[in-house]
């Protein structure tokens, strides 16, 4: 019986997955620009490569979310395990391919369809326990994941300074091995409990499309629109942070430090998230996170040395650090019970997919044509628009709440 399993054991194993995944992410996402710059790609080319990677992620996550919702007898951990093994193989290929634009773009498309698409499924590993009454501490696990991301970023930054950017892929391979092991040993809900729970959920009479789902749930639609706008801004600030750091006189080591500070600042919020949920609603916490995304983008405009960058990176304590757990719980509350995995996948599609895609494309073009200051101003405009939409929409009563 599920009740016989130790909640502490489940939390520990889920935390291990979050930590190993975020360390892997710190390599292939956090340092992808550094790697591509070392292979002599221009900012606009890097923007295109990262953008098509995100497009591939959008397509893949939409498919995976729908697939997991419709095939509940296939354990999520099995789907995730296949994805991470494929990610390891792709990383090995990336080590040996030539620095040719279209070949590199194809490999990053494969990364987008595998590792980049795993976030929603990993979140759903915890939510599937929550939905059957097992209170997995998502905030704590994700907070430890941020600590791992910070540690990974700091370590990689130092290694890259000493050994060169190609070492990123070696470190990434090691992290991928760890996450494969972590997923393999993770407890799935007892088949008797989880499958019965999914069978008891009323299945839709027809295969509703994502568009039908969004048309029927305006609150989700507005939330996704706000995320796209905000993550256009976030994508510019995060993915082109190496250029921002260089603009104020920093180097690769400073970039690693800046990335680590941002990740470390997320930890208190994520660890204490369950306390915040007792005091207020997930919707209000989402609104607060969007406000801090906007504040950070404004302050970046006025940063003229690396220490300002370090300080403003820590605003993620109530920006991205609050957004991650708040958005997971908020979407879990507003979508129908037979669409919860697809709902979580759409969050990742809108934010890390569509939003980051546009941010990568637009940021790369602006950097090559107008420079860092212009990109920061455009970033702030998008962040402001995202905040306005989420502020106006979440406060409204909706008949779509479940």
Image (spheres, rainbow, N blue to C red):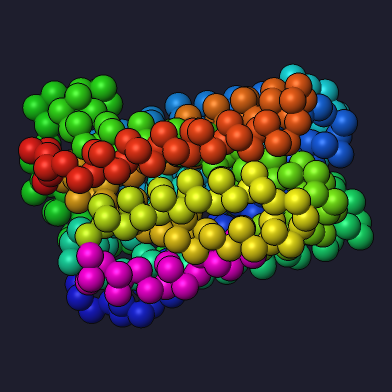
Viewer can see residue 53: no
Q: Nearer the viewer, residue 302 or 230?
A: 302
- Quadrant location of residue 70? top left
The image shows a total of numbered marks equal to: 0
Q: Is residue 88 left or right of residue 380?
A: right
Q: Residue at x 33, y 44 (%)?
A: 344
- Quadrant location of residue 397? top left
Q: Nearer the viewer, residue 149 or 71?
A: 149
Q: Residue at x 12, y 31 (%)?
A: 204
Q: Is residue 277 left or right of residue 36?
A: left
Is 206 a magenta residue?
no
In the rendering, at what x and y percent does residue 248 appear? 80, 49
Q: Is residue 275 left or right of residue 47?
A: left
| In the image, residue 134 above or below residue 381 | below
Q: Residue at x 36, y 55 (%)?
A: 288
- Quadrant location of residue 223? top left
Q: Residue at x 81, y 27 (%)?
A: 42
Magenta residues, dominant SS class: helix
Viewer can see residue 299: yes
Image quadrant holding the N terminus, namely bottom left
In the rendering, at what x and y percent does residue 337 appear? 16, 45
In the rendering, at what x and y percent does residue 378 appear? 58, 31
- The span shown in magenta is 261-280
Q: Is residue 300 left or right of residue 83?
A: right
| In the image, residue 199 above or below residue 48 | below
In the rendering, at what x and y percent does residue 7 appear? 31, 77
């Amino acid at each position: 019986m599920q009740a016989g399993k130790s909640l502490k054991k489940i939390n520990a194993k889920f935390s291990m997955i979050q930590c190993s995944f975020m360390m892997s992410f710190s390599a292939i996402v956090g340092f992808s620009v550094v790697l591509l710059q070392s292979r002599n790609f221009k900012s606009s080319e890097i923007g295109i490569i990262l953008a098509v990677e995100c497009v591939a992620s959008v397509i893949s996550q939409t498919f995976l979310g729908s697939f997991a919702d419709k095939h509940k007898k296939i354990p999520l951990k099995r789907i995730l395990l296949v994805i991470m093994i494929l990610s390891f193989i792709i990383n090995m290929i990336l080590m040996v391919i030539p620095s040719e634009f279209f070949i590199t773009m194809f490999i990053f498309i494969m990364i987008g369809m595998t590792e980049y698409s795993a976030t929603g499924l990993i979140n759903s590993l915890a939510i599937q326990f929550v939905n059957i009454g097992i209170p997995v501490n998502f905030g704590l696990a994700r907070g430890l994941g941020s600590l791992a991301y910070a540690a990974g970023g700091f370590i990689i930054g130092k290694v890259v300074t000493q050994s060169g950017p190609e070492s990123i892929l070696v470190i990434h391979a090691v992290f991928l091995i760890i996450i494969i092991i972590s997923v393999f040993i993770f407890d799935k809900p007892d088949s008797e409990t989880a499958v019965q729970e999914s069978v008891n959920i009323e299945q839709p009479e027809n295969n509703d499309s994502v568009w039908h789902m969004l048309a029927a749930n305006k609150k989700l639609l507005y939330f996704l629109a706000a995320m796209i706008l905000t993550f256009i801004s976030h994508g510019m600030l995060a993915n082109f942070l190496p250029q921002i750091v260089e603009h104020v006189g920093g180097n690769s080591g400073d970039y690693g430090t800046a990335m680590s500070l941002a990740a470390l600042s997320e930890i208190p919020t994520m660890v204490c998230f369950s306390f915040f949920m007792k005091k207020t609603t997930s919707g209000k916490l989402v609104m607060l996170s969007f406000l801090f995304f906007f504040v950070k983008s404004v302050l970046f405009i006025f940063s003229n040395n690396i220490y300002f960058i370090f300080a403003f990176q820590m605003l993620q304590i109530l920006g991205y650090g609050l957004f991650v757990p708040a958005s997971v719980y908020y979407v879990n509350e507003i979508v129908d019970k037979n669409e919860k995995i697809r709902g979580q996948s759409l969050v990742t599609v809108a934010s890390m997919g569509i939003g980051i895609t546009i941010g990568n494309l637009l940021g790369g073009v602006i950097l090559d044509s107008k420079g860092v200051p212009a990109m920061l101003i455009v970033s702030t405009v998008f962040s402001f628009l995202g905040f306005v939409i989420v502020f106006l929409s979440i406060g409204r009563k909706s008949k779509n709440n479940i």
